[in-house]
Amino acid sequence: MPIPYPDWLPLAQKSKTPKPDTGFRTDQPQIGAPIFQKLTDDLKTGFSLTWIFTLAEHRAFMQWERSPNYLDNSNQWFTMPVGIGSGAYGEPEMQELHFTARPTWAQSGGVFTWTGDVVTRKLLNSDDDYDDIVVELPPPWASFLDIIVTGYPDNRDPESLPRAS
């Protein structure tokens, strides 16, 4: 069971360098085009993440990472929202992550900066269920589905479908 990231701590800064696996093998024959052979759909993705904390947040994060009641020195899987640029409004998506090595930190005055590399078993993306709409309908048409189903973000349309509570 993955350990939840403390919801009161700031989320990690958006990773600039996701590192997805490749699910195929490439053969380069002496003559002709390359041959691509699909191997798997079970693809992990790695991220380099950075957190910026105050002293109190730093202390809590350090204990969360070290304590045998939580990540046990980075030996446990954990869940945390990570911004991957999906969804109509780009909200962070909950991911199941594991550190690939213990994260490190640096201090500058009262600011503590933690960095760590993580891997996810499968990148969860809310756009996956709507791939045809996202690909085939150029903006702003694709966002109409969000408005029809969930209404405007500012709730200005009283006739949109009711939101689930």
Image (tube, rainbow, N blue to C red):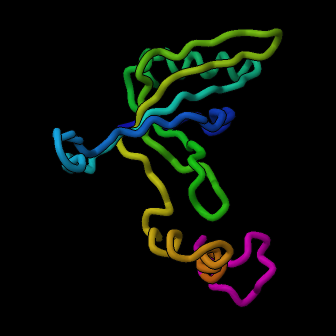
Look at the image and tell me in which quarter the C terminus lies.
bottom right
Q: Is residue 51 left or right of residue 126?
A: right
Note whether residue 68 is visible.
no
Q: Residue at x 59, y 79 (%)?
A: 145
Q: Position of residue 11 (x, y in %)?
A: 64, 36
In this rendering, is residue 74 above or below 163? above
Q: Image quarter for residue 12?
A: top right
In this rendering, is residue 107 above or below 79? above
Q: Residue at x 76, y 86 (%)?
A: 158
Look at the image and tell me in which quarter the N terminus lies.
top left
- The extreme bottom residue here reads 159
Q: Position of residue 59 (x, y in %)?
A: 66, 16
Q: Which residues are magenta?
A: 149-165
Q: Residue at x 57, y 56 (%)?
A: 86
Note whether residue 133 is visible.
yes
Q: Position of residue 31 (x, y in %)?
A: 17, 44
**Does residue 132 belong to the magenta stretch?**
no
**Does residue 155 belong to the magenta stretch?**
yes
In this rendering, is residue 37 above or below 17? below
Q: Image quarter for residue 25?
A: top left
Q: Residue at x 82, y 9 (%)?
A: 109
